[in-house]
Amino acid sequence: MCRYRKRLGIVLVCGLLCFLICLPCTAESGSGGTEKVWQLSGGLTLRQQGDMLTVFSADETDIGTFSGTLQIACREKQTDVVFLLMKRDGGIYLDACQCADKESFIGQNRVGLPYAQGILRAGSGRLDAAAYVAYPLENAGSVQYRIDLQAGALVCTETDRRSAPVQWNSDAAQQMEIQPSSADSSSAAETSSQEAEDSSSENASTISDTSSEAESSEEPVSASSADSQESKPAGMLYQCSGPVTVAEMEQDFRNHYGVQLSQGNDIHFFTSFGVSVSTGYLTTGDVVKVCKNGQAVQTITLIIPGDLCGSGHPDEASYQRLRQCVAGGEPLTGLSAWAADMKRPEGEVSAGVSAPAPDTADLLLLKRAADL
């Protein structure tokens, strides 16, 4: 019996030692950074591990590695170039990978912060055959860049989408879901449970302080009202009948308001960034200023139905954004919410009226308008 107990003790001690030796390795593996994977057309795969992103070909060959965290990406099908919006060094940079030559190009200048659910597009210019990319911005509107690739460097130059028309020809990267292992799931569940207990304890100890602060606040502001104030455009809103050029809108406003040049009145158009516009298509968020003797007497913000991403017309990017919203994803706010209303007739939007929640009817109308 004593010999049996000794053997059993030795087995237990060895088992415990093995467990303690393996435990740090498992923890280190789980904390090394969650891997994220995206897929692109042509069998390409993007793998994010920590602060490094690697592009793999269809046969799992490494064809490019980039530092930073991927935001959005796309593949330009004609040139087989993958464009990557990467977050690093406190900013957003545009990198590129030429798949056929396995050549990487690193962004040299910072670019605008993209909208989290936006789609990166790439294509070639209709006039100069240069490479261009475009995407919706986090705050409002969208941006378009002309791309210059040389000697491993990528330089972006912001361009006016009206003066540089582009033939878009790209596929957006689709993020894939990775099923965690059972060990990771158990660890995550335990961590979540512990955090919930800590949070509940902290809330219990501070609830009286929160209540007293709420009672002492004379003018509480809800999150929704704060958001609406931030995204509220100056002047009144005007819902257009569809995509419209500067010349067409100018004539329409002259007829609507009876503005006559002989009376010293004039009409000026500006982008949402305040840049003067004289030709091309207008986009959601562009501004019309009716001036008299050089002074603005009326400011009007335009809404182009179906233009949620600043292209000036219903397109795939706007359709995908609306589809995510209708499916229960992140709700639309500001001018994008108005642009999603495909059923509203042309004309002024009454003051104080909130944008209606989009539905499947709006989604189907936008899809038809975008010819998808």
Image (tube, rainbow, N blue to C red):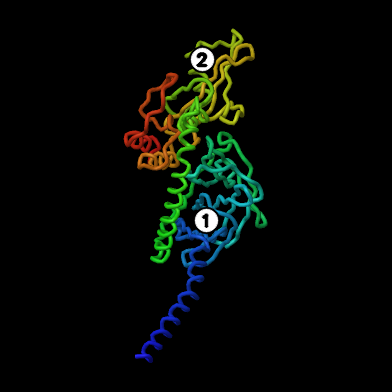
Quarter-wise, where is residue 161 in the image? top right
Q: Which residue is mark 2?
A: 254
Name the spot of residue 136 as percent of width and height, x first: 51, 40
Name the spot of residue 166 as percent of width and height, x first: 53, 41
Judge by depth and name the residue closer to the eye, 252 or 70. 70
**Which residue is found at the position 41% from the left and 60% from the top?**
190
Residue found at the far top of this picture: 263
Amino acid at dot 2: Arg
Name the spot of residue 221 as percent of width and height, x first: 48, 29
Name the spot of residue 304 as percent of width and height, x first: 45, 29
Find numbered disc 1 in the image and state the secondary structure of the residue it sits on.
loop
Give the quarter of the figure containing the N terminus. bottom left
Q: Which residue is mark 1?
A: 80
**Which residue is found at the position 57% from the left and 29% from the top?**
271
| Residue 346 in view, yes or no | yes
Judge by depth and name the residue closer to the eye, 92 or 345. 92
Is 250 rendered above or below residue 18? above
Amino acid at dot 1: Asp
C-beta proximity under 8 Å, tags 2 and 1: no
Residue 152 relative to residue 185: left or right? right
Find numbered disc 2 in the image and state the secondary structure of the residue it sits on.
helix
Give the quarter of the figure containing the C terminus. top left
